[in-house]
Amino acid sequence: MLRKNCRYEFDNNCYARGLLVTLANDVVGTGPRLQLPNDVDAEHAFTEWAGEIGLVNKLSTLALAELRDGDGFAKLITNPRLDNIVKLDIRLIESEQVCSPSAHVFRGDGDDSGVEVDAYGNVVGYWVLGVHPADVPMGDAAVQPTLIPGNEIIHLFHCVRAGQLRGIPSLTPALPLMALLRRYTLAVVSAAETAANLAAFIKTTAPASGEAAEVEPSTELDLPRNTGLFLPEGWDLSQLKPEQPCTTYEMGKREILNEIARCLDMPYNIAACNSSGYNYASGRLDHQTYDRSICVRQSRMEFMVLDRVLRAWASEYALAENRVVNITGRDWMFVSRPHVDPGKEARAQTHYLANHTTTIKDECAKRGLDWETVLRQRGLEIKLMNELGLPVAATPAEAQTVAPEDDNE
């Protein structure tokens, strides 16, 4: 029921869709870059394979499914149509397809999760339907899920309770507020339409004891544009004052949306795509909590998805190339948020590189670049510049080191 309600809001509420899509995009970005310091050839082979199977798009779908549905499922399969020497592929699975054979009977023992565990809590398998439940004819008992070994299924979810086997949609706490936000907007629009439909009303100006010209109650009067009008004696023409939207309408929507975004650790200006009420310092301060949350989600994706994919790929690649693949010391480099002021960022990089508190590898990783590729390309450029007699920029150690400026200056 939670999954259905969250999907309804995602499909019919602009804010709900924007919140989840923005968060999924910030987590995955343009895709993590693998770095294998002990096996550069395997690193390049993995990057080529990932591009062929569309790994980035599948990771984005998994991240969005975890947020909207509570679970992101995928199955490791063999795809013989791949041009790569590694035929490993990833097939995404809808969360409804993971269900126990007795899911239609409520037994109250947690068996409807579709997850089989051993006595130690290790996942040994998943019950997966071969087709989506919506494609199964009503009452067709012949379609039953198949138990697939746990090492073939990727399951991305956020565990917040001991013993939890399935995830809860991230928008669950915000569902009542999403409905309230929609009702508030519709109520304001309805009130404005009602006021607009009544172009004018006629009321008597006669005192209570006086008499006015007799008029049939609720009589409608068509008012042509740009014309004068004589009213019966004792009657006056007035217009309704536009009361909607009221002056607190924007403030009310802001508070509701701010509360909705809190369950996602997202600041208001990102949730609303509106930073008009922010200054630079406030924006950066609000982003600190959000950026830490992004790092936590990326770390969960590394261990629950990327590392498992890498191990499966390395095993098949080693067989295909008949050699050992060393994945020890692997790093997944996600693209970080760009700095608002590139000048300050460049000065900070020069300062940190000069006093050896950062590395070229880390600085390149923030931009989603491979440091070895950057250095090789830079070496070729410097060599050509020397041949042409062009001046070469000073290295960070030789450049004048200036401490990063304060952001409030």
Image: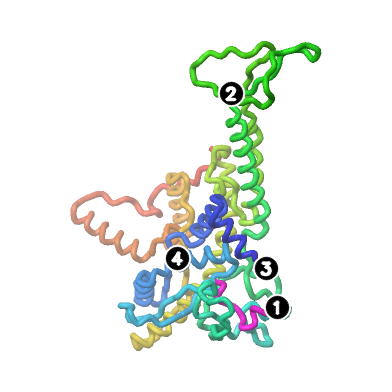
Residue located at (59% from left, 70% from top): 157
Q: Could you tell me residue 186's position as x and y percent?
A: 61, 43
Determine whether the residue tagged by mark 2 lies in a helix, strand or loop: loop
Marks 2 and 3, Cα distance to the nearest angstrom? 64 Å
Q: Mark 2 or mark 3: name the one nearer the start of the chain.
A: 3
Residue 105 in magenta?
A: yes
Q: Are marks 4 and 2 in contact (CB under 8 Å)?
A: no
Marks 4 and 3, Cα distance to the nearest angstrom? 25 Å
Label 1 or label 2, whichever lies nearer to me, is: 2
Marks 4 and 2, Cα distance to the nearest angstrom? 68 Å
Task: Tell me which segment is drawn in magenta.
Answer: 95-106
Marks 1 and 4, Cα distance to the nearest angstrom? 41 Å
What type is the residue that disc 1 sits on?
Answer: Phe
Q: Report the residue that reaches farthest toward the left.
A: 388
Determine whether the residue tagged by mark 4 lies in a helix, strand or loop: loop
Identify the disc placed on residue 221: 2
Q: Could you tell me residue 16's position as x and y percent?
A: 57, 54
Identify the disc placed on residue 226: none
| Up/down of 22 relative to 249, above or below | below
Please give the residue where the numbered disc 1 appears in the rendered image: 106
Residue located at (53% from left, 85% from top): 148
Label 2 or label 3, whichever lies nearer to me, is: 2
What type is the residue that disc 4 sits on?
Answer: Pro
Label 1 or label 3, whichever lies nearer to me, is: 1
Please give the residue where the numbered disc 3 appears in the rendered image: 160
Circle 4: is it few (<14), some (14-19), or many (20+) Cα within 10 Å?
A: many
Q: Can residue 75 be seen in this view?
A: yes
Please give the residue where the numbered disc 4 appears in the rendered image: 32
Determine whether the residue tagged by mark 3 lies in a helix, strand or loop: loop
What type is the residue that disc 2 sits on?
Answer: Leu
Front residue of 155/206: it is 206
